[in-house]
Amino acid sequence: MYRDSGSITHAMMTATAAARTSTGRVRSSNEDAFGYRPERGIYVVCDGMGGAAGGEVASRMAVDTVLQRMTAEEDGDVEPMSERERLHEAIAEANRAVLERAEGDAGLYGMGTTLVALLLGTDAGARPALIAHAGDSRCYLMRAGKLSRITQDHSLVDEQMRLGAMTAEEAERSPFRSVITRAIGTQKSVTEDAIEMEVEKGDVFLLCTDGLTREVDEAGIARILGAGPDVERAAQSLLDAANEAGGRDNVTCLVVGIRQR
């Protein structure tokens, strides 16, 4: 298990973050990765896939590439981009980096990773939050005691459910539930979904891999996130709940809380 935490204070609000990751109780290695730079308001979680060490390489590369791109100083000679454009370019760069590494190393061929990112920017609450994702790693928002799922999985069964072609019970039993339809590093280009939303005092964002959501239902996630404002306790409790429920996959939870200074 690995843990990390940090915070950044702005004029009126404080964004505090904590993350936990675990191999789980079945897997022998951890293909999840996370990273964040609270001073720049960028938070990323990835879930790698691929033979040998491919998943671990892909997820770590994607996290590092996005963080590096989002924290780099912009070239003064180039027309400045919006935060949305910058995040899109960072994800595109991560896709290129992972794909090129896989094509150059036969042992890593076919590797890829999901990605979910939260961008609060350098002034939390001063502008809308931006959530971008590809794959089935998720972002949730806990606001005023209610849990909302912000992202929709790019997976075969989730898309079938949205079309009404499969029930939740059928999806749970489907042998194709692990098949994702978008990922970083598996194609020449990737189109991430991006959602903008206003930030409010008391908001709690959760970025997580499917190792959590396949073991803990949304009611359980809501109970843990609603238990108090301590993001470190929340991240640890979510991880513990996933492992206690079986821990059949790697699990990563990154919790970001917004509160009044």
Image (cartoon, grey):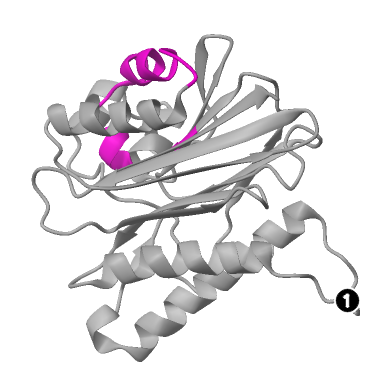
Task: Tell me if I can see residue 177 in this picture.
Answer: yes
Q: Is residue 96 left or right of residue 9?
A: left
The C terminus - image quarter: top right
Q: Residue furthest top?
A: 145
Residue at point 26%, 25% (across, down): 216
Q: Quadrant location of residue 30?
A: bottom left
Q: Position of residue 156 (x, y in %)?
A: 35, 44
The mark total stands at: 1
Vertical side of 205 occupied by 51: above or below: below
Q: Which residues are magenta?
A: 206-229
Residue 76 painted magenta: no
Pick whichever, 221 or 132, lies toward us. 221
The answer to which image quadrant residue 209 occupies is: top left
> Does dot 1 land on a helix, a strand or a loop?
loop
Amino acid type, callout 1: Val
Classify 78 as above or below 247.
Answer: below
Is residue 211 highlighted in magenta? yes
Relative to 186, is 157 above or below?
Answer: above
Across and down, in percent, residue 223 comes to 37, 13
> Which residue does the image show at 50% across and 51% down from the upper left?
44
- Taking depth in this image into account, of 171 and 92 the one nearest to the observer is 92
In the rendered structure, the answer to whether residue 227 lies left or right of residue 196 reads left
Dividing the picture into quadrants, the one containing residue 234 is: top left
Looking at the picture, how far across and down is residue 246, in whole percent?
A: 11, 32
Q: As drawn, is 120 to the left or to the right of 29?
A: right
Viewer-closest of 60 and 258 = 258
Residue at image point 61% right, 48% down: 38
With 83 as the anchor, is 256 left or right in this view? left
Residue 43's x, y, as percent? 55, 48
| Residue with the mark numbered 1 | 78
Residue found at x 45% / y 24%: 230
Query: Is residue 186 at all visible to an observer of this figure?
Result: no
